[in-house]
Amino acid sequence: MSGGPDVLTLMGVKGGPAIRPGSHMPTSNLLQMGGQTVLIDAGLGCTQGICKAGIPLTGVDCIVITHLHSDHYLELGPFFHTAWTAGLTRPIRVVGPKGLQAYWDGFLASMAFDIDLRQEDEGRCPLASLAQIEELSDAAFRIGAIDVQPLRNIHPPITDSFALRFDHDGTRIVISGDTAYMDTMADFATGADILVHEAMLPAGVEALVAKMTNGDHRLREHILRSHTSAEDVGRIARDAQVKQLALTHMVPDGDPAFTQQDWVDAVRKHYDGELHIGIDGMRLLP
């Protein structure tokens, strides 16, 4: 459990699972709010990101997974295993879509030799019980004193994909998850102190797909139908009258042909408030 002021750390801001020289890391966020430390998505690199944020792995109170694309939960099992070897002995609540339990069971099976060995040879507590998995749905829930409201977003072909709104003591933080443009997002995020929204540049998507060696037209179609253009993100932030907007899950990432100014120009067509073009490790104060 954390103390101090509320802070949101963007630990991974790259869209998609692949990393390359010069790219950011896939999706993960760390929210310290209302005395709670919450990991939101567990993409590759999240474990190191938590440590870089100055939080011990044993200090995470809850984990929320927005949907079951690998760039949002690939490192959930390794996080638990690493926290376990770092001294974690208490369960951590994990709220995620249906199917997450199967991932956890599979991770435990894949690491059974090491887990059994460490429990016997090093006297460690059972690892399996440390992840207390609950199903994420449209229903509101609480994390300590934080009110959490999910919103089912548009991310085909996945149907169990959610945006999240966190409210505590007059502070509101909204994370879009992965989603196509939705009119309802502006209502959902109304008055947010921080809106963290995924974003793409359509011209950048075309450039990305043109360079791919192991994808075809279906990848292009998926990105364009399942994500939100930076210009539309600006429209949402304007309509919601958010105090701060941060872009994340950015596509493309690491392409020198598309600079920070391209993102700014797209958003500024509609939103003139405080804007952050996300980078790994960025800390945002509401």
Image (cartoon, rainbow, N blue to C red):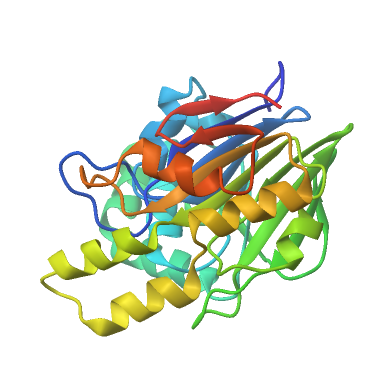
- In the picture, which quadrant includes the C terminus? top right
Seen from the viewer's position, the closer of residues 76 and 28 is 28
Residue 182 percent location from the top left of the image: 66, 69
Farthest right residue in view: 169
Which residue does the image show at 58% across and 54% down from the upper left?
233
* Residue 198 shows up from this direction: yes
Residue 151 percent location from the top left of the image: 73, 65
177 lies left or right of 138: left
- In the picture, which quadrant includes the N terminus? top right
Q: In which quarter of the image is residue 16?
A: bottom left
* Residue 85 shows up from this direction: no
Which residue does the image show at 39% across and 70% down from the upper left?
106
Which residue does the image show at 71% across and 15% down from the upper left?
4
Q: In which quarter of the image is residue 85?
A: top left
Farthest front residue in view: 269
Farthest left residue in view: 213
